[in-house]
Every structure is written in C-alpha cells, then in structure tokens.
Image (tube, helix red, strand yellow):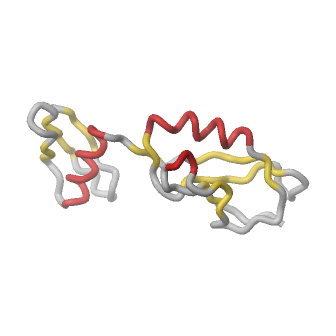
Amino acid sequence: MKQLICIVCPKGCHLQVDTENGNKVFGNNCSRGAVYGFEEVTMPKRVVTSTVKVKNGTINRLPVKTSKSIPKEKMFQCMDIIKALEIMPPVKRGQVIVKNILETEANLIACKDIK
C-alpha cells in the first residue's frame, strides 16, 4: 500500500493506493483524487517551472513553465532544453517558447511580459 496526499485541490486527501491489487485508490473524496492517485503510482507527471535567458531585455531571466504536466522521467531532458535557450524580447505572457516540448503535447510558455 502506497500512501499519498492528493494535491489536486486544497482538501489534501490522504490517499492509499493498493499497488498489489490493480492500484485501487482509497481515501479520495472525489474522482479527481482517484485519478491523481492512480497516475502518481503508475506514471507520475509534473509541471516544470524555470527561467530562460533573455538577450537585450529589461530583465535577464524570463520565468517559464510547461502548459501541462509532463512525465517525471523527462524533467531533466526538459531542463537541458531550457538551459540552452536564449530569447529576444518582446515576449508576451502566455507566448509559446517551445512547442510540444519533448513530444509531450505540453508547450513551454512565458509567465511574464518583456519589452
């Protein structure tokens, strides 16, 4: 039995996932918690947040994040791509910096405007 705390909503349900019997989830108060518990045990995902170098901007680093969670095992590859990037202004918040990063169907997006 694996113990988790659900992070889907502020309730923070204490989940138990029976890894020996089909990853059945207990302790969730909603169906989203059941999905979270199952996915966290079988294929964990995370939203990646970081910064990208800015060339000739009003700030030196642009905050970025993935538009949705990506497989946890691809996080280091994602960070390698982010570290190699350097962008030029102007940039609008929500602008796609890298489309479909690592073929995850997640885009790397800007979290701030830069003039």
Q: Is residue 73 left or right of residue 107?
A: left
Residue 101's spot in the image, x, y percent?
57, 50
- Classify the position of the N terminus by image quarter: top left
- Classify the position of the C terminus by image quarter: bottom right
Residue 36's spot in the image, x, y percent?
28, 50
Question: In percent of the image, x 65 and y 62: which residue is there?
Answer: 96
Q: Residue furthest left?
A: 21
Quadrant in which residue 24 is drawn: top left
Q: Is residue 47 above or below residue 19?
A: below
Quadrant in which residue 45 is drawn: top left
Question: In percent of the image, x 58 and y 53: which residue is there?
Answer: 65
Q: Residue furthest front?
A: 103
In the image shown, does 51 or 99 lie closer to the viewer? 99
Residue 92's spot in the image, x, y percent?
72, 68
Q: Is residue 47 above or below residue 32?
A: above
Q: Is residue 15 left or right of residue 91?
A: left
For the image shown, how many numbered marks are present on the structure? Answer: 0
Q: Is residue 75 left or right of residue 63?
A: left
Question: In percent of the image, x 20 and y 52: which residue is there?
Answer: 34
In the image shown, does 95 or 28 lie closer to the viewer? 95
